[in-house]
Image (cartoon, rainbow, N blue to C red):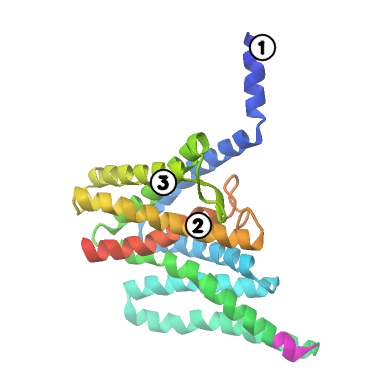
Amino acid sequence: MTELWRLNITTIAKNPKVQNFFIRTLVTAFLVPITFLVIWAGGWWLTVLITICAILGGWELASLVATDKGKLIKFICSIWSGALVVVMHLYLEDFGFMFTVFPVLVSIPFVLMICTFWKVLVTKQDALRKLFQITSSLSKNSFVALVVGGLLSFALLLNDLQAGRDWIYSIIVVVAATDVASYIFGSLFGKHKLVPKISPSKTWEGGIAGLTFAIFASVIVYYLLDLPTNLGLSIVFGVVIYFSALIGDLLESSLKRLVGVKDSGSLIPGHGGILDRMDSILISLFVGYFFVLWTID
């Protein structure tokens, strides 16, 4: 009996899904406390964290949609994405100083563009055609990469509101509760597909569980952090963040499905790319900011 039990444990431990789950758990246990500590510290600490996420996320998003696989354009897009976060911090901290630094930040991608165009002209290999290709690719990739920096910047705007730090915590907890509940209940009880053409793994059962736990988490955080709102609005907040997270998740899933990849990257062991972890957060920060601004602050 003991040997059979050991055999079952060994078999389970060798299961790739189980191994991936343990890796995800260990990485999460490492990253979550650091993230919460940086949010608590606020100021430039928070800005640096968000800027790093914006740069890495901008690179991944540009990689997904790139028609030109060159690293230079993806680098320009990631710099744009991170610069937007820094500019937002300077705007909130000192409006005058922003005008001093802003031209430098904006000039970086243009300098890189000029260097790229110069390289094309010097090589004289279909210069005009390559010039148009680079310009088209750059404009498209810059637009979608700026989405990352733009949406992440709402964390700084949210932090500037009354009890802003606690609202950021609330969004992260609600999104995490949604993801975990949807995954567990969907895996155990899911039978009816929610959006099979975009995300085959999502089910109605998992979605209902995710919504329920989103509301539950929102109410718990409301009481624990003594948020400046009421029980009714905290329930509505949970519902709003749930649907925001779902939309963000589906948007990234549809993009990955369109380009034929499973993950946006491989930066975080057991999780994939940083966009795979931020997809639900991005839209939630944007929507959460205006919810707090219009109903509470």
Between 164 and 251, the one lying in front of the other is 251
Please state which of the two labelled residues, at mark 1 or mark 3, is closer to the viewer: 3
- Cα distance, mark 3 to mark 2? 14 Å
Residue matched to label 3:
178
Query: Could you say which quadrant of the image residue 295 lies in?
Result: bottom left
The reply to whether residue 4 is in sight is yes
Q: Which residue is mark 1?
A: 3
Type of amino acid under label 3: Thr
Residue 146: horizontal and vertical position, in percent? 50, 72
Which span is picked out in magenta?
Answer: 126-131
Q: Secondary structure at mark 1?
A: helix
Q: Quadrant of the N terminus?
A: top right
Magenta segment: does it hold 276?
no
| Disc 2 + disc 1, Cβ < 8 Å | no
Q: Residue at x 40, y 53 (%)?
A: 38
The type of residue carrying mark 2 is: Leu
**Occupied quadrant, residue 164:** bottom left
Q: Provide residue 39's location: percent of width, then percent of height.
A: 37, 54
Residue drawn where x is 42% and y is 55% of the image: 245
Q: Earlier in the sequence, mark 3 or mark 2?
A: 3
Alpha carbons under labels 1 and 3: distance apart: 39 Å
Q: Amino acid at mark 1?
A: Glu
Q: Which disc is residue 250 wearing?
A: 2
Question: Would you place residue 134 above or below residue 190 in this image?
Answer: below
Taking the image as shown, residue 210 lies to the left or right of residue 77, namely left
Does 189 sit left or right of 89 as displayed?
right
Question: Helix, strand, or loop for circle 2?
Answer: helix
- In which quadrant of the rendered view does residue 75 lie? bottom right
Q: Nearer the viewer, mark 2 or mark 1?
A: 2
Could you tell which of marks 1 and 3 lies nearer the N-terminus? Answer: 1
